[in-house]
Amino acid sequence: MSDIFSDFRSLGLGDLSGADLYAEPERPQVKQAPPVVKEMIPVGEKDLLFDKSYDCPVCGQKFKNKTIRTGKNRLIRIERDLRQVYTPVDQVKYDVVACPNCGYAALTRYFDSPTRMQVEGVRKNICVNYRPQTWGEEYYTYEDARLRFQLALANAIAKMSKSSEKAYICLKTAFVLRGERDALDPAEPGYEEVKKQNEAMEMEYIEQAYDGFVQARLKETYPMCGMDEPTTDYLLAALAFEVGKLDVASKMVSTVLASRSASSHIKDKTRDLKDEIIEAVKKSAGK
Ligand SMILES: [Zn+2]
């Protein structure tokens, strides 16, 4: 199906690739991994990190992962699709917890709580095939982060996670790719090509995130991935806008603006998005 599974094979998990992300894992299909160009890592990234200890709920081993020291990284803006941009460290790179021993990995918020059935799914589909990885000694590069998110996605498929969890992994992977693009050095050879591939890959993840949240909205209850209903509806509007579904975006915007429980922050974001939709509609009508 898509390039979003491209790194499964290097993790030893090629069999989980392909298939519909929101259905059962089936046919293997792996495409080439995206090229890697030198990235600019902010000075002092390692100083904002520490090794946090975890007990793996799947294999029982103790291990350590890099984590951001809270309070030292500064939020500078929140983008249309709720990507939080921090300086100096792109925090989303550290949002997957991965056991180096057995390959179990999940977004931080889901790591500790797999059900017994899910643990079985991970053992059967991940642990038996997993090739141990070494992640950054001092910090995680964007390549490390992409692989860790791929591992989290493979685990989400193996443990038959809810659509919202898979959609959230896809959304955050899109954020990793966006951060990676910002960190690319324009002076590097092949910059334009890599940037283009990165953008295309990001769009695939945004599309997957959109599809997943559409399904989640029909089947699941709130809070969803820590978001209340108006926030989820706003996010869906933003993703619909980004994938070019202006009618859906517009409908969701009206829903949020009519909501009594939406926060003023979300209403403000929604009004901004409404302006963007109006502009886009005008533009497409003028073509
Ligand atoms: Zn483990």
Image (spheres, grey):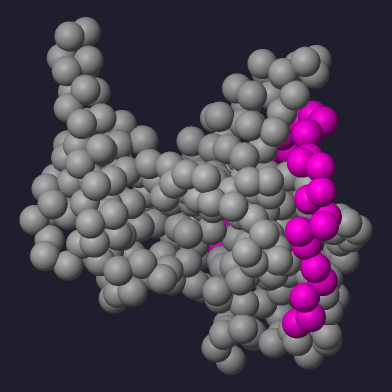
Q: Is 51 part of what is drawn in magenta?
A: yes
Residue at the image point whose x is 83% and y is 86% from the top: 61
Looking at the picture, how far across and down is residue 94, in whole percent?
68, 59
Per the rendered image, the range of residues in magenta is: 25-54
Q: Residue furthest left?
A: 258
Picture residue at 52% right of the left edge, 45% below the top: 76
Q: Nearer the viewer, residue 191 or 244?
A: 191
- Residue placed most toward the observer, 180 or 84: 84
> Can residue 214 be seen?
no
Q: Magenta segment, principal secondary structure? A: loop
Left or right, 18 with reference to 261: right
Q: Residue 135, how many percent across, how many down?
A: 85, 58
**Is residue 46 depicted above or below 87 in this figure?**
below
Q: Quadrant of residue 31?
A: top right
Answer with left or right where residue 86 lies relative to residue 47. Answer: left
User: Could you say which is closer to the camera, residue 140 or residue 284?
Assistant: 140
Q: Residue at x 66, y 77 (%)?
A: 122
Q: Is residue 92 left or right of residue 233?
A: right
In the image, is residue 183 part of the stretch drawn in magenta?
A: no
Percent x, y of residue 261: 17, 67
User: The C terminus is located in which quarter?
Assistant: top left
Spot the residue most to the top.
287
In this figure, what is the number of numbered marks?
Answer: 0
Q: Residue at (28%, 54%) from the top-left corner?
A: 265
Asked whether residue 51 is in view, the answer is yes
Q: Tell me where residue 4 appears, x and y as whole percent.
A: 59, 45
* Lateral position of residue 131 relative to residue 6, left or right: right
